[in-house]
Amino acid sequence: MNIKKYTTIACIVGGMGIAGLSASCTGAFDEINTNPNSVPYEIMLRDNLITGSAIGQLENYCISADANQYQRMFNLAGDIYAGYFGATNTWNNNNNGIQYVMYPEWYNVAFEVGYERIMAAWRVVDLVREEEPQAFALAQILKIFGMHKITDMYGPIPYSQFGTSETATPYDSQEAIYRLFFTELDDAVDALVDFVQLYPGACPLKNYDAIYQGDYVKWIKFTNTLKLRLAMRMAYVDEAAARQYAEEAVNHPAGLLADNADNAFYPVPQRNPLNEIWDAYQDARMGGTIACYLNGFSDPRREVYFSLPSGTTTWNGVRSGTTYSATNLNNYRNRAALPNVGANDPLQWMVAAESHFLRAEGALRGWNMGGAPKDLYEQGVRTSFDQRGVSAGYAAYIANATATPANLSPAIVSADAYTYNPANTITIAWDEADDFERKLERIITQKYLALFPDGQEAWSEFRRTGYPRVIPVRINRSPANTISTAVQIRRLVFPTTEYDKNSVEVQKAVEMIGGADHGGVKLWWDKKN
């Protein structure tokens, strides 16, 4: 047995932190008497206890199940920036990320979770990759699923050299990270395919994998879909590579998440964090942008996604960037539609509808996606309707060629009203006569409605494509107008903790994005406009 390796594992499992990954435990492990009450490492390996516990942590934090972390990582960032939710509180006297004031108590959190939880847990499995290659493959997939969200928030991040230094950790450019993602995903899929062929039906991590109960066939489909998502993210910066990766994903023999039976959901151990945020905290309500689309389209998913507060009859959304006072805060909380997310609902990770919309966009671009844009687009809407239990409304909905998004009602506060100018005229029914841009808008708009409540992914797609037409913030307090109200926020700034503890390397990262660290700086793949 490699004593040094398992000493390091013991340290990581005990701390799960970014700093001191191998420095806090003694190197004389073999000279210490074995604790008779502990489980020997040989047994932990044999029973998958080491890898299983790390896989469990990875799944718990890829989309954090902790309400306070989830709120600051996602609900007060991508969720509101995509217009899915309006955040209803007065944090820092209305000077916070909602009004484009970068607030360290919020923007530090995603980075901390990424390294202290996701990457630390991955490191445990990395150290036993030779003994547990299929578990390492799954850890790679989970790491990429979690960390692609982190790089899509900040841009450059430490990645390829994580865990190699106890003092400073270099950053990789976002381009380098994405290129490495594809290599790692391909290697992971190959390892899982080999395992499935050798041991059909075997699920060695069944007791630890809360998503698919160790079913590697489903994980392969998940990985192909994740690869397709990341490939499409590159469409405006390197279309040739994006097409190559997308076609590889679509044409892989194992396929994609094509059916709702393959959807990835995480059953939270305690309480759904979004439920806690809107119900216990009273901090989230229906967003203004999604309200305009659901209301204008008379979308039957509206009643699935949201519910009406007692005594109200209209589906009011909250405009991002508004400010609250002691007198109007309760008006928002009591009159805006409530997120229809229950305490025991699982967290949505990735659904089949997304794969159809990704293929629809690829086909629109002329890539080999195994179908025509219209058919794939309609399959995406149908799959979403089936997932939400509103299949009966599909036929009329998909044929509707006249409904357009509504303007934002001034029903709560008149200053929040918003009229699309020029008019937002996108419709539902596919029209082959439309030009590329209008067809793309149609695809992304319906994808937006199907992705709910994954605001992080919706925000990334808005930044990449400009769709759907997210209502701009009402009040923009970004320092020195660094964030354009019209263009909207493009990223989070690097954490204050990095400037304190990793200052030389974070300054290099700032140079990678043009020399300025603010929310108006576009990411590597954000090149359409």
Image (spheres, helix red, strand yellow):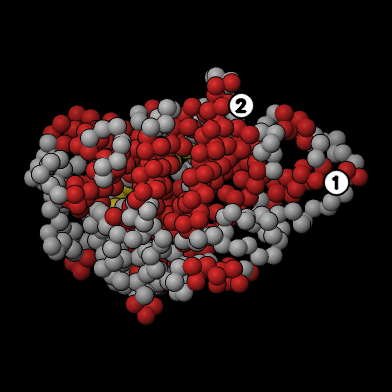
Mark 2 / mark 1, whichever is N-terminal: 1
The N terminus: image quadrant: top right
Q: Residue at x 60, y 63 (%)?
A: 170
**Residue in the picture at 16% in, 61% down:** 420
Q: Which one is in front, 509 or 338?
A: 509
Give residue 512's position: percent from left, percent from top: 49, 67
Task: Please tell me whether residue 23 is drawn above or below residue 327 in the rendered image.
Answer: above
Residue linked to disc 2: 204
Check disc 2 and give the amino acid type.
Answer: Pro
Q: Is residue 211 above or below residue 108?
A: above
The answer to whether 78 is drawn above or below residue 447 in the figure is below
Judge by depth and name the residue closer to the eye, 345 or 491. Answer: 491
Residue at the extreme front of the image, as rendered: 240
Q: Position of residue 359 (x, y in %)?
A: 30, 39
Query: Quick check: can you spot residue 307?
Result: no
Q: Which numbered marker is on residue 7? A: none
Q: Residue at x 80, y 34 (%)?
A: 40
Between the residue at mark 2 and the residue at mark 1, the CA separation in whole angstroms equals: 29 Å
Q: How many marks?
A: 2
Q: Residue 48 location in percent, x, y?
A: 67, 31
| Mark 1, residue position | 29
Give the crowd class for mark 2: few <14, some 14-19, many >=20 residues within 10 Å: some
